């Protein structure tokens, strides 16, 4: 595989807990995941991002870790992980692990030792205040669920800082011992076969927390150090950062110097584009996407965006104006119980789009042709729905629906004993939406996803090329963009509206031959002048532009 494998990857995000149970205890596990690798390989996935697999009280879906050097015993053993890494690699699939190091669980032995004894070597691994911090109700991440960021601990007789929930005390990243320990954690998992990390809450890790500091400095030396260490230990390992920060701040997460080489994280989730994609779909207007593409900060060469429509969290709309948010809520989350934290949506894509297959294809064609590497959440490829009867973000964390039946093939356990309830009935239940039924149906959404990913492989320009929005007059709902790379050029059309249109794009540079490679349905073949191009309602068309007259 090439050194830039991450630029041509398809990343699939899953939670081991809800993917496949192998031993009938009702909880997904690593052997279960191994048994589904052929499925993932057939889908075209080249990289798995596993949500946390470490021992954890799981009060925050595993993002509260109590041991960084082990596997949650319900999921299996370290041996099972090494086996997974090997089996995955044999299928050309790499593994990224969630690295959650802004905080630990309050059950972690480090914190237990720190709170018990002021003389503990771990006391200084956390952030303490002897007096009540004046700012302890500032900087809340989960409004409505979290009331403060400093909590008094009776045992420690001091206040400890927690950016997230009170059971997630923040590590003190000013402490050198913490930095050295986390590098050991990373080295440990690389040795076992991981190909890198998805770094949770990265800006908060870099933020040097000080009481009464409204605008604390960020120490990017942490990223420099990680990158150096990573490349020394495993040359092709990568860092994918969760950093939902201001656009102007993003380039610093991938490069130490403006216009310098990519010497920090390899990849950043594109949190700027995500809400704009949803706004564009809601308004049936391409402008928010055009704006997102044109205003995206330029990243260092070799650095890469990771694109997504839905992930394991709420769909976060906080980067939109109130008016824009209202449009997205009205279109895709009309009821209050579909919303969360005053800023987001706790639904999956299929029900958000009313189960409209044409619109689902359009949305994913749009995502997969945005600059960057696409990330797909498990179950989206078959059009799973959410379960709003479950609390908070659990609504979108129900077990994978492999087949019909009470446990959907997820487990042999009694349905009442599953780690999360399976949706069986209704439009998105396992009786209607499951892998087995879709696998043998060439018209299914799953089969469409397989074709989409195959076509994506034929268009490496998306991962590595330069993206341009076509400068021609177009109806508002239409996006026309192209990528140019030494490999060649590709051009994409998307119609966000429910009415068909006919377009004239004019002669395009480098287009001596135009070949249609992917589309939502039968169209007349394009002419060289790209005039009279039809685009169905919610239609999409992918073209390859070739120099020279044919083959
Ligand atoms: Mg199990």
Image (cartoon, rainbow, N blue to C red):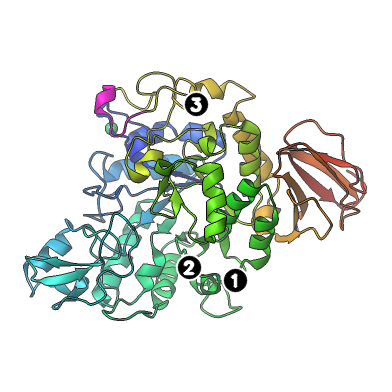
The residue where tag 3 is placed is 435
How far apart are the two marked residues, 2 and 1, measured between alpha carbons?
17 Å
Q: Which label's residue is closer to the chain start, 3 or 2?
A: 2
Q: Where 322 falls versus 513 (above or below)? A: below
Residue 64's spot in the image, x, y percent? 26, 54
- Does the numbered disc 3 mark a residue whose Cβ is under 8 Å from ligand 1? no
Identify the residue shown where x is 41% and y is 57%: 197
Q: Which label's residue is closer to the chain start, 3 or 1?
A: 1
Q: Secondary structure at mark 2?
A: loop
| Residue 400 is at least partly visible in this image | yes
Contact, mark 3 vs mark 2 (Cβ under 8 Å): no
Q: Quadrant of residue 358?
A: top right
Magenta residues, dominant SS class? loop
Q: Nearer the viewer, residue 255 or 273?
A: 273
Q: Secondary structure at mark 1?
A: loop
The residue range painted magenta reads: 414-422
Position of residue 376 in the picture relative to residue 108 (left or right): right
Image quarter (top left, top right, bottom left or bottom right) of the C terminus:
top right
Identify the residue shown where x is 23% and y is 77%: 134
The reply to whether the magenta stretch includes residue 224 is: no
């Amino acid at each position: 595989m090439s050194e830039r494998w991450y630029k041509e990857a398809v990343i699939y995000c899953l939670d081991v807990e809800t993917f496949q149970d192998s031993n009938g205890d009702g909880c997904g596990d690593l052997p279960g995941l191994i048994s589904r690798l052929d499925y993932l390989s057939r889908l075209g996935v080249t990289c798995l991002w596993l949500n946390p697999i470490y021992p954890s009280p799981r009060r925050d879906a595993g993002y509260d870790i109590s041991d960084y050097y082990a596997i949650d015993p319900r999921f299996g053993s370290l041996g099972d992980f090494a086996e997974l890494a090997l089996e995955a690699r044999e299928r050309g699939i790499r593994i990224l692990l969630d690295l959650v190091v802004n905080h630990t669980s309050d059950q972690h032995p480090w914190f237990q030792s720190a709170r018990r004894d002021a003389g503990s070597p771990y006391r200084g691994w956390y952030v303490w205040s002897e007096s009540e911090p004046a700012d302890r109700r500032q900087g809340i991440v989960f409004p409505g669920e979290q009331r403060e960021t400093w909590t008094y601990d009776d045992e420690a007789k001091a206040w400890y800082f927690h950016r997230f929930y009170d059971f997630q005390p923040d590590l003190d990243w000013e402490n050198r011992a913490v930095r050295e320990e986390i590098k050991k954690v990373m080295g440990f998992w690389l040795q076992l076969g991981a190909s890198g990390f998805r770094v949770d809450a990265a800006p908060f890790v870099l933020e040097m927390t000080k009481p009464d500091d409204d605008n604390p400095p960020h120490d990017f030396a942490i990223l420099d150090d990680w990158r150096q260490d990573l490349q020394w230990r495993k040359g092709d390992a990568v860092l994918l950062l969760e950093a939902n920060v201001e656009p102007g701040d993003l380039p610093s997460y991938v490069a130490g110097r403006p216009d310098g080489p990519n010497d920090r994280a390899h990849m950043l989730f594109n949190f700027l584009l995500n809400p704009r994609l949803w706004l564009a779909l809601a308004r049936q207007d391409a402008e928010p996407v055009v704006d997102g593409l044109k205003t995206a900060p330029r990243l260092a060469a070799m650095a890469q965006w990771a694109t997504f429509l839905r992930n394991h969290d709420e769909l976060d709309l906080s980067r939109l104006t109130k008016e824009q948010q209202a449009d997205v809520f009205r279109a895709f989350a009309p009821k209050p119980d579909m919303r969360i934290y005053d800023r987001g949506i706790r639904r999956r894509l299929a029900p958000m789009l009313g189960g409209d297959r044409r619109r689902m294809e359009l949305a994913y064609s749009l995502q997969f042709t945005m600059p960057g590497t696409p990330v797909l959440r498990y179950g989206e490829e078959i059009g799973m729905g959410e379960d709003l009867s479950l609390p908070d973000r659990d609504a979108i964390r129900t077990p994978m629906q492999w087949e019909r039946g009470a446990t959907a093939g997820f487990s042999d356990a009694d349905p009442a004993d599953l780690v999360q309830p399976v949706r069986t009935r209704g439009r998105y239940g396992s009786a209607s939406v499951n892998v087995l039924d879709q696998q043998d149906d060439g018209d299914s959404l799953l089969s469409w996803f397989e074709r989409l990913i195959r076509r994506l492989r034929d268009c490496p320009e998306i991962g590595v090329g330069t993206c341009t929005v076509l400068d021609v007059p177009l109806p508002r709902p239409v996006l026309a963009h192209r990528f140019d790379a030494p490999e060649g050029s590709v051009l994409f059309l998307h119609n966000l509206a429910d009415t068909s249109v006919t377009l004239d794009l004019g002669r395009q540079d480098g287009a001596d031959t135009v070949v249609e490679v992917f589309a939502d349905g039968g169209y007349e073949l394009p002419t060289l002048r790209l005039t009279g191009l039809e685009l169905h309602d919610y239609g999409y068309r992918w073209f390859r532009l070739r120099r020279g007259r044919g083959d």
